[in-house]
Image: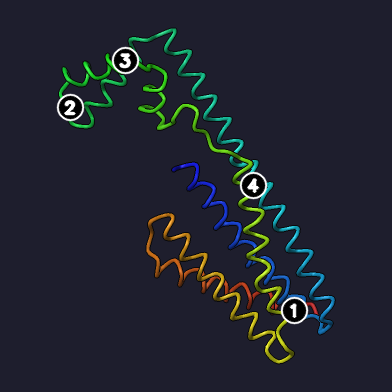
Amino acid sequence: MSEKLNTLRAGVLGSNDGILTVVGVLFSVGAATTNHFTILIAGLSDLIACAFSMAAGEYASVSTQKDTEHAVVEKERSLLESNRALQLQQVADYYQTKGVTSKTAYAIAQELMVRRPLQTVVDVKHNIQLGHYMNPWFAACASLISAAMGGCLPLLALTFLPGNAQWPGTIGAVILSVALTGFLGAKLGRGFVKKAIIRNVIIGIVTMLIHYYVGVLIV
């Protein structure tokens, strides 16, 4: 489940970043020029760059986490060989903190350390499941695809909506998109859905305003 949640998290964050970075470029370039082709190329270039940047970032981040988990497992394996008694005591202490009596906790620890010592130690001390490490490729692919899909929404709105409806439609697409990512992020993190949606919508609006006025100042 933690592996799936990590992939979903990468997807939600990638989608949100894709929306905000692309709309930032669209509004700043759109404020600086009325050339529709220039705006489209700028937005498309940023979409591609953002998607691959997010994927690379997720791959690096999750790879580091995976390497750290492997290093922790190897360290605990070494400690089991050099000081098994200390490891046994730490497992027993863990169960005592859960409300088990000292005698029972020690009995549980002894049985677990006979049946699966390394798994017991890394689970109790670091909450790591042996053989279940985060997959950097899954996180990178989820981030790449979601960032591209998220960034496509404002870009498509600007490209295909008729003249007068282009910018209002793009603003509407951005607000709808960031509200959806806020909803999904809150659901995955078991947070407050309403607060997450409002926060994301405000961030989206502020992003559009800042980039629009950046474009105006450049001109």
Q: Position of residue 67 (x, y in %)?
A: 58, 30
Taking the spot 68% from the left edge, 78% from the top edge, the residue there is 157
Measured Cα–Cα span from mark 2 to mark 3: 15 Å
How far apart are the alpha carbons under marks 3 and 4?
Answer: 38 Å
- The kind of secondary structure element at disc 1 is helix
Mark 3, secondary structure of its residue: helix
Sequence order check: which comes first, mark 4 or mark 2?
2
Disc 3 target residue = 88
The residue that label 4 is drawn on is 140
Helix, strand or loop status at disc 4:
helix
Asked if the residue at tag 2 contacts the one at tag 4, i.e. Cβ–Cβ closer than 8 Å, the answer is no
- Distance from Cα at disc 3 to Cα at disc 1: 64 Å
Nearer-N-terminus badge (1/4): 4
Residue drawn 72% across and 53% down? Answer: 52
Residue 91: x and y, percent? 30, 21
> 6 above or below 49?
above
Identity, as a three-letter code, of the amino acid under mark 4: Ala
Q: Earlier in the sequence, mark 2 or mark 1?
A: 2
Which residue is at the front of the view, 44 or 219?
44
Dot 2 corresponds to which residue?
100
Q: Give above or below for 153 relative to 161.
A: above
Q: Residue at x 84, y 82 (%)?
A: 35
Look at mark 1 in the image and give the residue it sits on: 159
Relative image position of residue 178 (x, y in whole percent) = 55, 69
Rendered-image quadrant of the C terminus: bottom right
Label 2 residue SS: loop
